[in-house]
Amino acid sequence: MEKILTTQPPLSVGSMQLSATLITILIGITAAAAANSGPAAGAGVASGAALRRDTSNQPSQITCKDPESLPSDCACNKIEGVFCGNEAINPACSNKKQFECHADGTTCWLGLSSLCKDYPMPCKAQGSAPSGCLCNKIEGTFCGNETVNAACTNLKQFECHTDGSTCLLADAGSCGGSTCDSH
């Protein structure tokens, strides 16, 4: 009977990196468990879900009252309570989301809320006003075409935002000449 020798192929660089990553994760979990095993265990950590959240981009000095909320970069008027975000006022305060305001001006994100509206982006051009005309979400200006959208008046120029909202520009610009026809 012949003895068959088998050899293991050497570990690839990718396998070694994966192993190192897994070991680092296990060490981190062990350290977190040890830190939470003292008398103050659970203070500031509502559940195991809180340990799994990625809070790397969130301010660490904020203490949220609601254990399921997360610290936010959205600043508030220092009047304690709950409010809806408005990106037109502060881009960090996302539309349709609720925030908890603290007396020091910091906030916590509470999540999406049906009570909060989706405000259109603010108009950039001076003298322009929000419009019911919708656009293709490519920033820039365009001429209205009532055939495509009745709210996009012919011979009028609009400012298009990345959220699809528009502003009617006070100056028609190049609409109506050779650049934009009245369609």
Image (cartoon, grey):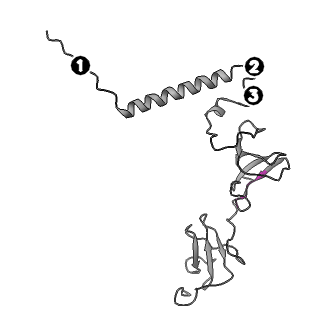
On the image, numbered disc 3 is attached to which residue?
A: 43
N-term-proximal mark, 2 vs 1:
1
On the image, numbered disc 2 is attached to which residue?
A: 39
What amino acid is labelled 2 in the image?
Answer: Pro
Residue stretch rendered in magenta on the structure: 83-87
Q: Residue furthest left?
A: 1
Residue drawn at point x = 55 percent, y = 68 percent: 138
Residue 94: image x %, image y %?
68, 54
Q: Image height check: is 157 above or below 15?
A: below
Sort mark 1 into few (<14), some (14-19) or many (20+) by Cα contacts within 10 Å. Answer: few
Left or right: where 49 falls relative to 101: left
Mark 2 near mark 1, Cβ–Cβ under 8 Å? Answer: no
Is residue 58 visible to the viewer in this orientation of the structure? yes
The disc placed on residue 6 is 1
The quadrant the N terminus occupies is top left
What amino acid is labelled 3 in the image?
Answer: Ala
Q: Image height check: is 76 above or below 58?
A: below
Q: Image height check: is 27 above or below 109?
A: above
Is residue 152 visible to the viewer in this orientation of the structure? no
